[in-house]
Amino acid sequence: MNKERKVIDIQQIKAQEQICARIFEQVTDGGRRPLAMVDTYGCQQNEADSEKIRGYLAEMGYGFTQDEFQADVIVINTCAVREHAEMRVLGNVGALNHSKKNKPQQIIAVCGCMVQQQHMAEKIKKSYPVVDLVFGPHELWRFPELLEQVMTRHKRVFATENSNGAVAEGIPLRRDGKVKAWLSIMYGCNNFCSYCIVPYVRGRERSRLPEDIVREARELVEQGYKDITLLGQNVNSYGKDLDCGVDFSDLIRMINDIPGDFLIRFMTSHPKDATEKLFQTMAACEKCAHHIHLPVQSGSDRILKVMNRNYDSAKYIRQAELARSYMPDLVITTDIIVGFPGETEEDFEDTIRLCEKVRFDAMFTFIYSKRVGTPAASMPDPYTREDKQKHFDRLMEVSNRISAEKHKEYEGKSFRVLVDGETGKDEYNLSSRTNGGRLVHLKGDPALVGQFVKVKITASNTWALYGEIENG
Ligand code: SAH
Ligand code: SF4
Ligand code: F3S
């Protein structure tokens, strides 16, 4: 096993749980039920982290609220991937002045990727005195200890040291839903795409042990979860740091072997590491969803090179074709960045061409956002925001049209879907997902939430399908 792989000793997690018990005594004194609010920005990885923060808070005796005026503790779990995400966080943190004025004992914590950047931690220190506690993703496992410091020392605590990160098992979890669950299989990223902040704030790739992942998956199935999403920045490199002979495809098979009726999903796959073995495994494992989120980022080979993505458009297209040859019903979704520094009209046309060729079921498109400390931040970027917006709008049109065309093909056909929630609307009161992850609105008994049902698709648009439950 890789000697660099740092593991937090389980005794250290136990010590954190003892601190939770101490805090419990203090905050529930007199039979009071204190309240916490956890607000999450960013990706599923952050959602999964917030479930750990809630797990700890629940052990401390906190109930949960969405009302900042009611909360005794507020935790804002932040994202740094684009400037827009950071602006929203800062705006919302600033607004907490009001709730704290109302409730001076309120403790406000800001954690996650944004504050792992030293300039952001500094900014909060200087300009947001309302914040009592700041901690980065690497310190999450010791959140109880940090919170206790704030409570007992009555001074601000900052824990954002730079680190490659560790793996911590045994942190209590409080999951959001009852049907779908996140399951982190690895943390961090080694790829250093030239535009991306994630490797700087999340540390190096480190995989959880297969036995820990399979145990957690088994528990989820036993608890009735029907849709398990394996999470990592690049799940295709799972296990490379472990040297234990289990790669990502093997892991899918191990989870597929767990008895029960459930779906295995995963994200995100990096095209440079997606293999034929993965596609074969997805096709062979009956519980593995036929969906792959395979971010292409650009269709221009020149731009892909400067992005440091380590594949070209031809390789990407070959992979999509190979994957579809194993799974003709495969849903392929992607991420695209528009307006990367120096992206020309011609580069952009290459992206459009690739999209028309691959025909993604859905695309997530972003305008490039400069991230301090990344190589792309110092590349010449002569094009204006207006130029980029024009490209963005055009790509959106292409994306919407293809999605609508793809959705149209579902009409009149029957599919097995997992009912995952209620919409609160009259006409279509239930939401569900196809095996490939497409959203289907339905009308039916709310008791069906958490069950697989057969539906006939009756209508569709760019964003969703509409269906009727079939009997029998
Ligand atoms: N690990 C995943 C992506 C994580 S970030 C992968 O490599 O596929 C999610 C998406 O945000 C990326 O796919 C990319 O499209 C977008 N993104 C990342 N950094 C960005 C930046 N600086 N500006 C705009 N979009 C960015
Ligand atoms: Fe960012 Fe690239 Fe890592 Fe994805 S693979 S998190 S885009 S550096
Ligand atoms: Fe954002 Fe961090 Fe995820 S930067 S996208 S929350 S890994």
Image (spheres, rainbow, N blue to C red):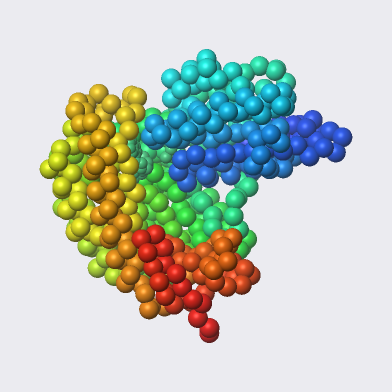
Q: Would you place residue 295 above or below residue 107 in this image?
A: below
| Residue 261 visible | no
Q: Residue at x 66, y 29 (%)?
A: 99
- Is residue 433 left or right of 170 when viewed as pictured? left
| Residue 283 visible | yes
**Could you tell me residue 249's position as x and y percent?**
37, 58
Farthest residue, direction top: 126
Q: Residue at x 38, y 78 (%)?
A: 413
- State the residue in front, 299 or 191: 299
- Is residue 161 left or right of 444 when viewed as pictured? left
Q: Quadrant of ligand 1?
A: top left
Picture quadrant of residue 360:
bottom left
**Could you tell me residue 27's position as x and y percent?**
78, 32
**Could you tell me residue 200's position as x and y percent?**
38, 29
Q: Residue at x 32, y 29 (%)?
A: 370
- Report the quarter where the N terminus lies: top left
- State the residue in front, 241 or 115: 115
- Is residue 28 left or right of 430 when viewed as pictured? right
Q: Would you place residue 203 above or below residue 251 in this image?
A: above
